[in-house]
Each structure stands twice: as structure tokens, then as C-alpha cells.
Amino acid sequence: GEIDFYEDPNIDFYPILEKAKGVKLMPTGKLDSTHGMIRLNHLHPPFNNPKVRQAAIAAMQQEPFLRAQVGVKEFYKSCASMYTCGTPYGTSKGSEVQSKSNMKKAQEMLKASGYDGTPVVILKPTDLAAIQKLPDVAAQLLRQAGFKVDLQAMDWNTVVSRRAKKEAPAQGGWNIFLTAWLAPDVWSPLTNAALGTAGEKSWFGWPSDAQIEKLRDQFARETDDAKRKAIAEQIQVRAFEVGTHAPLGEYVNPYAVRKNISGLVVGSGDTYWNVKKN
């Protein structure tokens, strides 16, 4: 009886919570969905080669990630968009390299890319349950595609320190890390940090593309909703071409709440001013 509200239960606990006396599970709403992401480092081999980035993205089928990390089918769904699906900018435009691909296609693309067997260093956090299984899936899929993979386990604080390093992987840098965002973080070209392509001034991974930066500036200045949507689609098409990152689907974590708690506003995030204990 010490806990009234559990915001983010581990998925593995849901069968226990569903049977627990006096406990109810509450959906969080689409605006509290979580979005997995794989991020590629553009500064160093092999992902300084856009064709190799394309091959890696082609191997990143979403279902294996969702099945491993979440497992409960009712809690997750594939989403081809780099933006939040079901919101105004959600679109599948340009996603075919990932959403319409398969492992055979990824293998063919990698062979044609000129990949020379350079090991891919993937950072794996061991103490962050929300994304802990994603790097293992990425490593397996990349190996199946033909990449040589070096999966390095460490705590999350070390991942955060390592991903900020611009040095080559052999000098303490990295090639890939995986993370997850809440819906508002990625639902537009301006909030989605992974779409910034200002080179070494960008978010970790440091992609550089003048076309995307120009389009993001146009998006910020445009006031017509239909034109903004069209620009957002152009940005996504170009981002898949450049290989900024790959979305890994969406999932929700229902709240676990004692049945004597009322007033929670579903889908509002962490807002508690209306909550009552009856």
C-alpha cells in the first residue's frame, strides 16, 4: 500500500499488475507514446558512407525491436514515420528504404555499398530497462545484413558520455547508439533533434545536409498548415536519403494506479494537480 501511482512500470510486470488486488492499468494516450530510434555516426567509417548508412537502415525492421523490447502486442505498433504517427506531420513518405525492405535487400545494398568490414561499435546500456534490449536486436540484424559488429555494454551514464565524443570508435567514440523519445519530442521537424543536419553543431551523430537545414528554416517560417505539412514530408524524404537515423516503431506504457486514485488526465504527461485519493 505504499505506492499510489506507478508511471512507467517495466513491461514484464504487467501480468502481475493486471492481477493485483486494488490496482488498475490506465492507457496513457497517443501523445505519451514512446518512439524508438537508432542513430548513426556520420563522422567515421563505415557510416561516413551514405550507401552504407542506407544498407544499415534497410536492415532495421521494426517488428523485431518492438517484440523484444515490449512484447505485448496491444502496447506497440510499427510506424514508418520519423514524426509521431497519428499527428499532423506523421507520414510514410520516403520511408521505403526501411519500411518496404527485407534482410535480403539489406544484404544486397551492403554488398553494393563498398563496405570493407569496418567493425560497427554499438553502445549498449545495461541499466536502462526502457531501451536495454534495442542494441541487442540492432546488433543481430546488422550481423545478418553482413556487418561486423562490436556490441559494447556499459551503464547509461557512460553511454551519455561516449555518445558526445567525436573521436573515432577506436579512440573511445562510437558508430551507433539507440534511444527512445516521447511523442512531443519527435512530432515535428523542429522538435525532432535527429533531423538537425548542421554538421558538428547538430545532435550526436552530426549529419550534414544543407537541403534539410534549408527546408527546416522554411518550415519554421511558413504559416500555412498545408504547406508546412508538405515541407515536413520533404524533410523526411531527404532524411531517409541522407540516413540521419531510423525510427523503430511506437509503444505505450500504461500507468499502474491504485483504484482509490481518481482525477488523472490521460495523455497529459506528468500533470497531477487534479489527482485525488478517495
Image: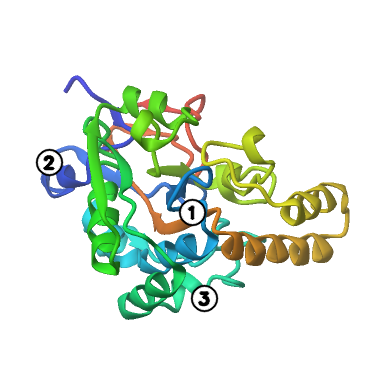
Residue placed at 41% from the left, 56% from the top?
A: 250
Write the residue at 27% across / 33% down: 128
The amino acid type found where label 1 is placed reads Lys
Q: Position of residue 168 (x, y in %)?
A: 43, 35
**Badge nearest the viewer, 1 or 2:** 1
Label 1 to label 3, Cα distance in Å? 24 Å
User: Which element type, helix, strand or loop, lies under badge 2?
Assistant: loop
Left or right, residue 32 beside residue 146: right
Q: CA distance from mark 1 to mark 2?
A: 25 Å
Observer-nearest residue: 228 or 27?
Answer: 228
Q: Residue at x 47, y 53 (%)?
A: 47
The picture places residue 62, in percent across and down from the top left corner, at 36, 64
Q: Quadrant of the C terminus?
A: top left
Q: Label 2 sits on what residue type?
A: Ala
Question: What is the quadrant of residue 201 in the picture?
Answer: top right
Report the side of 205 relative to 66 (left or right): right
Dot 3: element: helix
Q: Amino acid at mark 3?
A: Glu
What numbered label is drawn on residue 20?
Answer: 2
> In the image, what residue occupies the spot 63% across and 35% down?
200
- Check disc 1 and report the residue beneath it: 30
